Image (cartoon, rainbow, N blue to C red):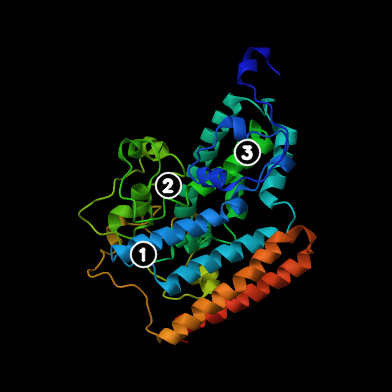
């Protein structure tokens, strides 16, 4: 421990569960070093689980505001598809008692770290904040510019709505790919500090998935905001492959991927070629099927490799990320995939989904006492249930 930095050292040795106020602040990265530095990973709170109540409250508030202003930003079928993806991705991470990402991180830190930074230093906290967001930017950018990584990430972009439920539409496979890019932090940052910032970086990105907040003033120059992230989720030509930042937008400004939201152009959300289904299996895995089909059909071994390693829009003879002039313009009025079903069928799907949530919550509560095989069984059960609900919404 360096005596010169004693004034920046913070004692913190007790584990705790964040209260409601602290959980709410965690969504905005408003936790200072004095309350979010821990000596050991076993003492790091699960900020994500603690924030679930805040997720629900903000989703209800957003729904109330959108109904009050007659914005109609939330559809039951699309919202439940997003929530289902969140449940499935969470269950997938519970199969192992410790995440694969964290296990790999600890191994790299133990064997190859370049320096022993104090876990309770303000400077370590700040470096971890910047390092986490810097590597997130490049991981996120790779997930759009490398087709086999996009196959995992596209699930998050498949929603044609843009609201808080969209933030929960997560991939079940992406973390196993992008974790290799985040490992750069392990060369300096202690695992407990990394675990805090990996959670806070993710939680921050929840509240930027909304159309309710238009601008936050001068902070738009530094932070990633709802306005910047709306562009990122757009399928308008000017939105494609832009605004990759997690918490900060400065990386996009530095590396040339920033574009401001055009107030006079309505953003259409979703994929350039929308998947037109609410089926959770197709949402998660549909692009993998297309990826292998393209590789099988294309001529030449190198072209087959390029299908996986270049951008989703790449074709032989085209630039690495595809020809931007070939991105189709959005047709107005914007039409979303929305099969018309009876009100009682929509209501049944709604009730069926939320009747499963107490079971899911109970499983999370007792997850440390449940075997891996039982979690796999639960994952199959929930996936089957969500698929049945999606078939109602797809009018199948």
Residue that numbered label 2 is attached to: 244
10 Å crowding of disc 3: few (<14), some (14-19), many (20+):
many
Q: CA distance from mark 2 to mark 1?
A: 17 Å
Task: Identify the image quadrant of residue 237.
Answer: bottom left
Residue 162: % across, % down: 38, 61
Q: Nearer the viewer, mark 1 or mark 3?
A: 3
Q: How many marks?
A: 3
Query: Could you tell me if the residues under marks 1 and 3 are in contact, i.e. CB atoms within 8 Å?
Result: no
Residue that numbered label 3 is attached to: 194
Residue 66: % across, % down: 33, 63
Residue 182: % across, % down: 59, 42
> In the structure shown, which secondary structural element does the residue marked by tag 2 occupy?
loop
Residue that numbered label 1 is attached to: 272
- Asked whether residue 213 appears in the rendered view, the answer is yes
Q: Residue at x 79, y 60 (%)?
A: 369
- Asked whether residue 315 appears in the rendered view, the answer is no
Q: Nearer the viewer, mark 2 or mark 1?
A: 2
Residue 1: % across, % down: 71, 19
Q: CA distance from mark 1 to mark 3?
A: 35 Å
Vertical arrangement, residue 4 with respect to residue 127, above or below: above
Question: Counting residues from the N terminus, which is met first, the one under dot 1 or under dot 3?
Answer: 3
Q: CA distance from mark 2 to mark 3?
A: 20 Å
Question: Counting residues from the N terminus, which is met first, the one under dot 2 or under dot 3?
Answer: 3
Question: Counting residues from the N terminus, which is met first, the one under dot 2 or under dot 1?
Answer: 2
Q: Residue at x 61, y 47 (%)?
A: 47
């Amino acid at each position: 421990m360096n005596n010169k930095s004693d004034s920046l050292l913070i004692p913190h040795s007790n584990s705790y569960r964040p209260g409601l106020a602290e959980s709410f602040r965690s969504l905005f990265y408003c936790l200072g070093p004095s309350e979010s530095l821990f000596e050991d990973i076993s003492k790091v709170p699960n900020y994500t689980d603690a924030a679930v109540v805040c997720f629900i409250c903000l989703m209800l508030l957003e729904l109330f505001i959108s109904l009050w202003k007659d914005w109609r930003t939330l559809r039951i079928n699309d919202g439940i598809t997003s929530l289902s993806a969140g449940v499935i991705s969470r269950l997938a991470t519970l199969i192992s008692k410790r995440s694969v990402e964290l296990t790999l991180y600890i191994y790299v830190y133990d064997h190859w770290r370049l320096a022993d930074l104090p876990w309770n230093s303000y400077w370590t906290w700040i470096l971890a904040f910047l390092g986490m967001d810097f590597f997130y930017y490049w991981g996120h950018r790779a997930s759009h510019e490398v087709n086999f990584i996009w196959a995992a990430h596209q699930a998050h972009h498949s929603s044609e709505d843009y609201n808080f439920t969209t933030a929960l539409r997560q991939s079940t496979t992406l973390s196993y790919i992008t974790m290799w890019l985040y490992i750069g932090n392990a060369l300096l940052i202690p695992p407990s500090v990394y675990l805090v910032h990996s959670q806070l970086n993710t939680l921050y990105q929840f509240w930027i998935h909304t159309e309710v907040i238009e601008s936050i003033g001068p902070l738009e120059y530094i932070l990633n905001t709802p306005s910047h992230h709306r562009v990122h989720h757009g399928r308008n030509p000017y939105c494609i492959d832009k605004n990759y930042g997690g918490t900060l937008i400065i990386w996009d400004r530095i590396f040339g991927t920033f574009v401001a939201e055009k107030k006079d152009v309505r953003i259409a959300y979703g994929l350039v070629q929308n998947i037109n289904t609410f089926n959770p299996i197709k949402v998660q895995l549909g692009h993998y099927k297309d990826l292998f089909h393209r590789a099988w059909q294309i001529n030449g071994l190198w072209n087959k490799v390029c299908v996986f390693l270049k951008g989703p829009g790449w074709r032989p003879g085209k630039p690495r990320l595809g020809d931007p002039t070939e991105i189709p313009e959005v047709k107005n009025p914007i039409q979303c995939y929305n099969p018309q079903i009876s009100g009682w069928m929509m209501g049944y799907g709604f009730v069926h989904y939320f009747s499963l949530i107490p079971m899911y919550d109970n499983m999370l509560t007792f997850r440390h006492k449940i075997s891996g095989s039982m979690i796999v069984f639960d994952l199959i059960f929930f996936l089957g249930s969500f698929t049945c609900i999606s078939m109602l919404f797809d009018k199948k």
